[in-house]
């Protein structure tokens, strides 16, 4: 009788797949792990977001500080973004992001940095980013702190776009020079798109 295999640990068991909805990688699938705080953007919200960004993606540099599934960064690359930096503190999730990027043939356009997002954002980047997906885990108070760090440490180009996804019950303060462009809501998720106005 062969020995029984140990059960999969719930933190590493694949939670499922997310399908990309547009661009050259349309219908491609990315694997997603079951990890605490990992919450892929709902399909309806993701579709709305990329309708908003339809003419804003060609050649842009994308930052995804709380990458999780990576769905937003992968979708941006699929639709014409030049490159994306994904920050993810969970080693297993970061490894799967790299695996997904290689499998989709976009490994050279995706950098995955295994690190704490707030620690990274408290440093000065090598270059600023044109588009930021700010989508932290809910109920941890991370969004306002991350927004302030993006502005304070030079992560944003002069007219950068910032997508903020947070709890609909939470009023998240953002820098005064971020101008609200669009917003939508789906269940517990509130999504807003901002345009940065130059300071000084």
Image (cartoon, grey):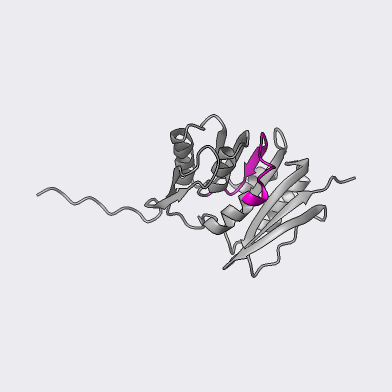
Q: Give the quarter of the figure containing the C terminus.
A: top right
165 or 49: nearer the eye? 49
Q: Position of residue 164 (x, y in %)?
A: 67, 55
Residue 68, position as x, y percentages in the image = 52, 49
Picture layout, residue 106 above or below residue 182: above
Q: Which residue is drawn at 75% across and 44% down?
A: 160
Residue for point 22% across, 50% down: 5
Q: Can residue 136 be seen in this view?
A: no
Which residue of the protein is positioned furthest toward the left in this rendering? 1
**Badge count:** 0
Front residue of this view, candidates 156 and 50: 50
Taking the image as shown, residue 199 lies to the left or right of residue 42, namely right
Q: Would residue 185 be counted in the magenta stretch?
A: no
In this view, the residue farthest toward the right is 200
Say above or below: 43 vs 74. Answer: below
Q: Where is residue 152 in the image (x, y as percent from the top left)?
A: 77, 46
Evaluate whether residue 117 shows in this view.
yes
Question: Which secondary structure dominates the residues rendered in magenta?
Answer: loop
In this view, 178 is above or below 30? below
Check residue 62 for magenta coloring.
yes
Q: Residue at x 55, y 39 (%)?
A: 78
| Image x and y of residue 140, in percent | 60, 61
137 sits to left or right of 149 = left
The quadrant holding residue 184 is: bottom right
Q: Which of 118 and 176 is in front in this view?
A: 176
| In this rendering, position of residue 127 left or right of residue 166 | right
Q: What stretch is highlighted in magenta?
A: 51-68
Q: Work out which residue is located at the far top of the displayed protein and give it.
A: 108
């Amino acid at each position: 009788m062969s020995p029984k295999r140990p059960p999969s640990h719930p933190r590493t068991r694949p939670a499922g797949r997310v399908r990309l909805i547009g661009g050259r990688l349309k219908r491609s699938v990315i694997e997603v792990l079951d990890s605490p705080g990992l919450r892929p953007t709902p399909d309806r919200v993701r579709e709305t977001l990329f309708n908003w960004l339809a003419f804003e993606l060609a050649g842009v540099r994308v930052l995804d500080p709380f990458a999780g599934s990576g769905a937003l960064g992968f979708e941006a690359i699929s639709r014409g973004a030049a490159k994306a930096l994904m920050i993810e503190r969970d080693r297993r999730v970061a490894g799967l992001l790299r695996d997904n990027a290689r499998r989709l043939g976009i490994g050279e356009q995706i950098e995955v940095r295994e690190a704490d997002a707030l620690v990274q954002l408290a440093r000065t980047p090598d270059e600023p980013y044109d588009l930021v997906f700010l989508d932290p885990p809910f109920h941890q108070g991370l969004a306002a702190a991350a927004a302030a760090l993006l502005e304070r440490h030079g992560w944003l180009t002069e007219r950068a776009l910032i997508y903020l996804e947070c709890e609909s019950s939470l009023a998240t303060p953002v820098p005064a020079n971020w101008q609200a462009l669009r917003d939508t809501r789906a269940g517990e998720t509130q999504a807003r798109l901002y345009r940065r106005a130059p300071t000084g």
